[in-house]
Amino acid sequence: MEEDKRNTVLFFAISMLIMLGYPYFFENRQVTNPTIVQDVQKSENAVIPIFTPKNTVPVRRTEAKNIRVESGNLSGVISSLGIEINDIKLKKYHESSDNKENVQIFANDNRDCFARSGWASDDPNVILPDENSCWETNSSLLSENSPVTLTWDNGNGLIFEKQISVDKDFLLTITDKVRNCGSRTASLKAVTVISRQFEVSNGSMNSYEGPLGYINNKLEEIKYEDIIEKRGIVHKTSGGWSGVTDKYWLTAFISDQKKNYTFIYKHFVKEGKNICRIESTAEAIKIAPSSEISETHNLFVGAKEINTLDMYEEKLKVQHFDLAIDFGWLYILTKPLLYALAYAKDFVGNMGLGILLITFLIKLLLFPLANKSYRSMNRMSALQPKMQELRKKYEGDNAKLGAAISEMYKKEKINPLGGCLPILLQSPVLFALYKVLYISIEMRQAPFIWWIHDLSAPDPLSIFNLFGLIPVNLPGFLQIGIWPLLMGLTMLLQQKMSPAPADPAQANMMMIMPIMFTFMFAQLPAGLVIYWTFSNVLGIAQQYIIKAADKKQSEKVEKS
């Protein structure tokens, strides 16, 4: 029985540690299938070749034209030289609260960061366009109502045509056509490429960042470290999509869902910088004289808004495009909660108030479970004097002490795990909401009230510089703002209202927990801290009401 009580007391601490530590130590959505993935480095020098057709003709760079991109959510420039998409900005999103420059997905001054589509051929006699080929076009604007058509003649019977359109959100649709005006049959394979410069990291412990794809009805997260080690990873799939993700942004090509493709994830070093390239290659198609072939590619370049991803999933008939968002291991809970959070924000007009509303509704939903937990803890607390008497009476005889405590529980009709199990059932919902608040783009640069201007950033104030009155820069671990302090205080108050551990060492450890978590939560986004603080406040109120009701009922019974 002593063991049961100790487990109940420690559950709160363990729950918090799981919430913060589980994603770091255990969560990993990478589900590499050894029957699909191939280590293409069979020897020290074996490397997958980079998709750069060598059977091309030289061009003059002076002929290049810039095509301006202007749609509802996108702006940028596409050059007719190589038609590499490497300058796209998101109109709705800024770099930071202080920097109002639009978020730029690709850096137009870096030729190793781009997306493009094209053709490849195993026949060295087929002359293909590449990144140095200058296409002809009479258009200078790509907009929702103004698609662009570009052409390139290889001078040997093949005429390449590229039609690009853009919608009001984040989708570029590229249709590549080839007309064979020659006398020989040609064999071509449609290819897409996403190139990305990167640091060897895959995001934080709560959010995956890096190459990924939906391959053979399964999400694959291809870590940079694995690509570097194997010098290339190959997947064969039917349909699906592939790309690279950041916490909030995604660049991905959506394949024809009825065709077979080879997805290749590769790494190389250029001028001391790591480059990752994600290629998709379709099966070869023969194009006879006086005929044409075409392949349509949908390129998503934008923000990971759940409603937008779901819209494209339905429109393009692509499976699980929503998994570009790192929902984690509680997908069945996190996605509905993300919907609810987005709706609450729109309903109240403020993300911070939306967090409070969702927290309140979840507490209301879990009210019966919490009632059982708090009522059980209150009854356990009322038994503390009797527990102390039994310990003194049977000091040194654990067998008799256990039997006596068990008899007391039976007589009082108390389940010693009655306070633990309801909390255990609540934990997945609370952890899922914690995850949603971390990954939600709705939190990014969203203000709350007063000094909180960005709910996705830590509380900017600190008690150690008197909340900004002393002009001194503090290290991160001393950046203890008002909201983390409130969270620590509410956690301490909850402990005071719960049964105290009989073991002094356990009691001391529990007293240290609020201090430790105050420092830990100070480094987390303010939105998460606000959620946890308000959840504590609601828990304290519920516990107080139940305690008062139990006391009143007990007094009533005694009088009767």
Image (cartoon, grey):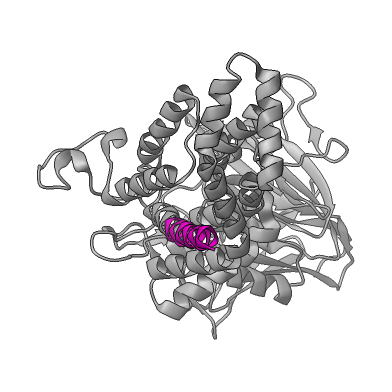
Residue at the extreme top of the image, as rendered = 396
Count of labels shown? 0
Image quadrant where residue 97 sits: bottom left
Quadrant location of the N terminus in the rendered image: top right
Q: Quadrant of the C terminus?
A: bottom right
In the rendered structure, the answer to whether residue 442 lies left or right of residue 266 reads left
- Quarter of the figure with residue 224: top right
Residue 371: x %, y % from top left: 58, 59
Nearer to the camera, 130 or 176: 176
Q: Residue at x 71, y 42 (%)?
A: 410
Pick whichever, 358 or 179, lies toward us: 358
**Above or below, 226 relative to 98:** above
- On screen, residue 126 versus residue 375, left or right, reads right
Is residue 551 covered in magenta? yes
Magenta span has 211? no
Residue 440 visible? The answer is no
- Kindly identify the residue that appears in the image at 56 percent across and 70 percent down: 340
Q: Which residues are magenta?
A: 538-560
In this rendering, position of residue 40 left or right of residue 434: right
Q: Tell me residue 50's x, y (percent).
A: 67, 40
Left or right of 82 in this view: 524: left
| Residue 515, image x, y percentages | 35, 35
User: Magenta part mainly helix, strand or loop?
Assistant: helix
Instruction: Check the image and report above or below for 385 versus 175.
Output: above
Q: Residue furthest front?
A: 560
Choose between 373 and 478: the one closer to the eye. Answer: 373
